[in-house]
Image (tube, grey):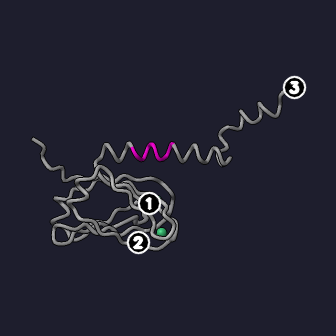
Amino acid sequence: MDTLDTNILIAIKCPNCGRMNFHNISLFKLFHSLKSDLCCSCGKREASVSLKDNKTMIIDISCLVCGINHTYIYSLKDLLKRKVTVICCDATGFELCFMGREKDVRNLVSKYQENLYLLLDELGFITEGDDFIKGKTNRKN
Ligand SMILES: [Zn+2]
Ligand SMILES: [Zn+2]
């Protein structure tokens, strides 16, 4: 029988240092506390999570794009039903946060980072390929 998993993983990018952090949240524990702050190791508060009526989750995210806080409200039922919920910035549509089942969140984040890497590479933002570029420009005429 499937027991209801009340742990969710929240992956969120720090608006201060840009690091991707993973926070394990026990909804069961959250029932007993008013609010849980999610902080980066650099000390910046990335988000805070709270529950209302034991049915609704309120997540307040410090947006790394706008520099302001966005507040989102989810039904716990929907949240636990979905594999991953992606939270995007209100103003820019930029993905700020992934939350859901641990395995799925980690999968999605690694894919997302891979894609971002490819995209940056395409745009020429990644400098790690210097050898390759040198190899090209130093070829014999
Ligand atoms: Zn940070
Ligand atoms: Zn924003």
The image position of residue 68, as x and y in percent, is 47, 74
**Mark 3 or mark 1: whose residue is earlier in sequence:** 1
Q: Quadrant of residue 69?
A: bottom left
Mark 3–mark 2 Cα distance, whole angstroms, equals 55 Å
Q: Start and end of the magenta stretch?
A: 108-114
Residue 22 vs residue 90: left or right?
left
Q: Label 3 belongs to which residue?
A: 140
Query: Looking at the image, which is closer to me, 45 or 55?
Result: 55
Q: Tags 1 and 2 in contact by the CB under 8 Å rule?
A: yes
Mark 1 highlights which residue?
96
- Asked if residue 125 is positioned above or below residue 77 in the image, the reply reads above
Q: Position of residue 65 (x, y in %)?
A: 52, 66
Dot label at residue 70:
2
Q: Secondary structure at mark 1?
A: strand
Residue farthest left in this picture: 1
Question: In the drawing, what numbered circle is on residue 10?
Answer: none
Name the one closer to the observer, 29 or 10: 10
Residue 23, given in percent of the width and then of the height, sits at 33, 54
Q: Amino acid at mark 1?
A: Leu
Mark 1 lies within 8 Å of ligand 2 (Cβ measured): yes
Which corner quadrant of the image does residue 136 belong to? top right
